[in-house]
Image (cartoon, rainbow, N blue to C red):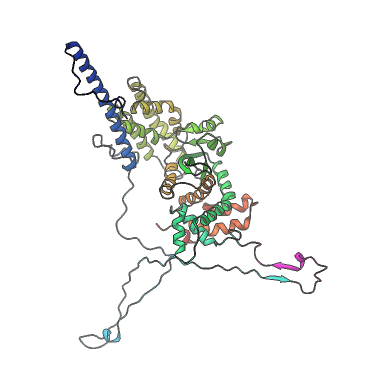
Amino acid sequence: MIAGMDAPPPDPGTPLPSDVAALQAMVRELLADNARLRAEVADLRGKLDAALKHRFGRRSERGRTSRRPPEPDADPDPAPAAGGHGRGPLPDHLPRRTVEHDLTAAEKACPCCGRERACIGTQAAEQLDYDPAAYFVLRTVRRVYACRRCDPSAVPAEQRLTTAGPPQVGPVPKGLCGPGLLAFVATAKFADHLPLHRLAGMIGRSGVAVAPSTLGGWVAAAADLLAPLRGLMRRRVLSSRVVHTDDTPVSFREPGRDRTRRGHLWVYLGDAAHPCAVFDFTPGYSRDGPSTFLAGYAGYVQADALKQYADVYAAGAAHVCCWAHARRKFVAAADAGEKRADEPLGLIRRLYHVERSLPGLGSSPDAEAVRAARRQAEAVPVLAELRGCLVRHRPGVLPRSPLGQAITYAVTNWDALHRYTAAGFLTIDNNRSERVLRQVAVGRNNWGVAGSAAGGRTAAMLYSVVATCRQFGLDPFAYLRAALPALFELGDQASDADLAPWLPDVWCTRSAPAAALAG
């Protein structure tokens, strides 16, 4: 409610004073109230516009306003080049079923001379078709052998008897689901964002009734199997020279509470030599999450300027701040009508223009050295100019205004924003993490809340695998279908050497072509 609007309106029948000075005082008071209310309405209108744009607008700020068209060669988030139109070829690994059409003997006869016409070629058309998923019963039979010659009273049973196959049928001991069904449920929930009650309905159409709570138990069992592998993935991430990290809120239910609590899913991305995406769940938003996950890490941490990472930096990690995050604050100021935001936005575009001209990481043996040298020569002078611009504008800007907040954010975190120029393997922003977190945001719109804090930790396990598979273009179902039974056989005490072949980036080098995602 706008301040002052809660007071009752004056009675129109109240007589006005006849004194001119009193009337002038009333007019001045009304003018002051009117100006204040206009300012508050404008502020609320700006907040409403920003909220509507955030909820329904384009995710990129490229087309944010018509009064300040972006420079054609200086867009920090350029649109990808448009691909060619038309249908691409269907993958070779898909099986082919051929339907042939031929003429009857009567139709082969030439209408002119009556003799049989010869086949001079064929015309073929390929379509992608689909058979509904086929459920089947996987029956595992274990043969038991015994020695008929030994005296049962003299020879222990474990010596006389032996059983073929594993001690237990997995991947869920005594569970109803086979490896394919377990992989399907996990993939459908965390890659395709289907809630468990919808999955229960899909499975129910086969004539088998499975409760959503049962599916939740299956997913939790899959997470338990993946826990040792996720531990190896975490150790690989901590061996990276730079770790990209970000978080997103996830609500979860807690026993004894009528309302849900807000937890957080954190993602940690390794570098090119350690390509894993590892998720972590925390039931709160304290510093304990990042400081526990990144304990002992002393490399670069590319993240937003959150206080939750303060202990990580205090322990020796170097903060690399995100220029995309800083830029959004200046975009918000420009959208609020602040013309003075145009100059820093133009300089930030120049920084991104430098980045687009650099060679890609891994493109050549000296790519990192070239990137670092070019940044020192081209980006550092722009950063110095930008710093001067911010210092010049800061005294004349209200601290709590959109532009004031943008300038304060940039100046306060200047060292971290400047740090990406120190090494060629660093990047100008943290968009890698934000792109990975989008899958959580999409899923959250479908399944709503996690059933418990344990459900949040289960989600972290499965999202780690799904996100890492996507980095390599792997089908998560194909990977989980192979990995879950193998991890079950390895057991809880598997060594890193045992687990390494089942890392997604290692597995994909020996997987069948069918494991790759089409397109």
Find residue 284 and report its horizontal and vertical position in percent.
51, 37
Q: Is residue 373 above or below residue 464?
A: above
Q: Residue at x 81, y 71 (%)?
A: 151
Image side of residue 382 versus residue 263, left or right: left
Find residue 55 and report its horizontal and vertical position in percent.
34, 41
Residue 431 visible somewhere in the drawing: yes
Q: Is residue 279 above or below residue 225?
A: above
User: Which range of residues does the magenta coloring cover?
Assistant: 149-167
Q: Nearer the viewer, residue 409 or 49?
A: 49
Q: Residue at x 49, y 40 (%)?
A: 263
Magenta portion: prevailing SS class: loop
Q: Classify residue 65 by image quadrant.
A: top left
Find residue 259 and report its horizontal and vertical position in percent.
47, 41
Q: Residue at x 25, y 34 (%)?
A: 68
Residue 276 visible somewhere in the drawing: no
Q: Nearer the viewer, residue 5 or 176?
A: 5
* Magenta region includes residue 161: yes
Find residue 76 and report its horizontal and vertical position in percent.
35, 38
Image side of residue 179 versus residue 98, left or right: right
* Magenta region includes residue 501: no
